[in-house]
Image (cartoon, rainbow, N blue to C red):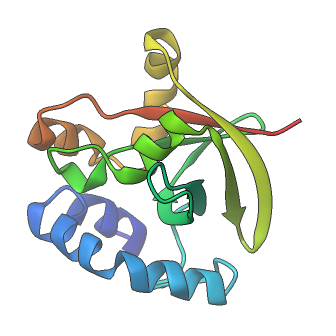
């Protein structure tokens, strides 16, 4: 089994989710510094982006490191929050203000987000599961539907 497959398998466990939450800030800084080439796991092997939203209360920029799938020119992200019961802050920020920025490999793009409707969600979930099979486990642990967002490049 290769390293990426092992990480995807381990990613379904509670202890890995706790570890991921604890190192996410360090991972975001490392990925920014190396333009996405390195993560805390070593050579970056999973598709990750930095999402910069506007804080719904503070009005300040807020960054989150997220896995993503592509749908044409759009980035697809899911608010798994590592299987926690509450939605991640970045998803609440996008619901309040859908204008954001996506940074992949050091390249930043302005985007406009929308919450996927039921049909769109059903179409996009297989691509998200291909990136991270643990999303179904996270949803079961969280006891909530995980929000799926489409991040379209701003016109």
> Across the whole image, how many numbered discs are drawn on residues?
0
Locate the C terminus by quadrant: top right
Position in image of residue 81 (x %, y %): 29, 52
Q: Quadrant of residue 14?
A: bottom left
> 14 left or right of 118?
left
Residue situated in front as seen by the camera: 93 or 59: 59
In the rendered image of this protein, does residue 31 appear above or below residue 60? below
Q: Is residue 95 visible?
A: yes
Position in image of residue 66 (x %, y %): 48, 59
In the rendered image of this protein, does residue 28 appear above or below residue 40? above
Q: Quadrant of residue 10?
A: bottom left
Residue situated in front as seen by the camera: 114 or 34: 114
Q: Is residue 130 visible?
A: no
Q: Quadrant of residue 22?
A: bottom left
Locate the N terminus by quadrant: bottom left
> 59 left or right of 103?
left
Position in image of residue 124 (x %, y %): 51, 27
């Amino acid at each position: 089994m290769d390293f990426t497959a092992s990480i995807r398998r381990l990613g379904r466990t509670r202890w890995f989710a706790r570890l991921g939450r604890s190192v996410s800030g360090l991972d975001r800084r490392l990925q920014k510094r190396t333009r996405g080439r390195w993560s805390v796991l070593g050579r970056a092997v999973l598709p990750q982006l930095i999402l910069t939203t506007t804080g719904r209360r503070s009005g300040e920029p807020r960054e989150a490191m997220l896995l993503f799938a592509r749908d044409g020119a759009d980035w697809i992200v899911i608010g798994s929050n590592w299987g926690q019961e509450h939605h991640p802050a970045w998803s609440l920020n996008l619901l309040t203000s859908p204008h954001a920025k996506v940074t992949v490999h050091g390249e930043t793009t302005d985007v406009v987000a929308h919450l996927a409707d039921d049909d769109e969600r059903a179409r996009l979930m297989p691509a998200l599961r291909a990136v991270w099979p643990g999303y179904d486990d996270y949803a079961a642990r969280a006891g909530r539907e995980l929000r799926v967002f489409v991040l379209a490049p701003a016109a």
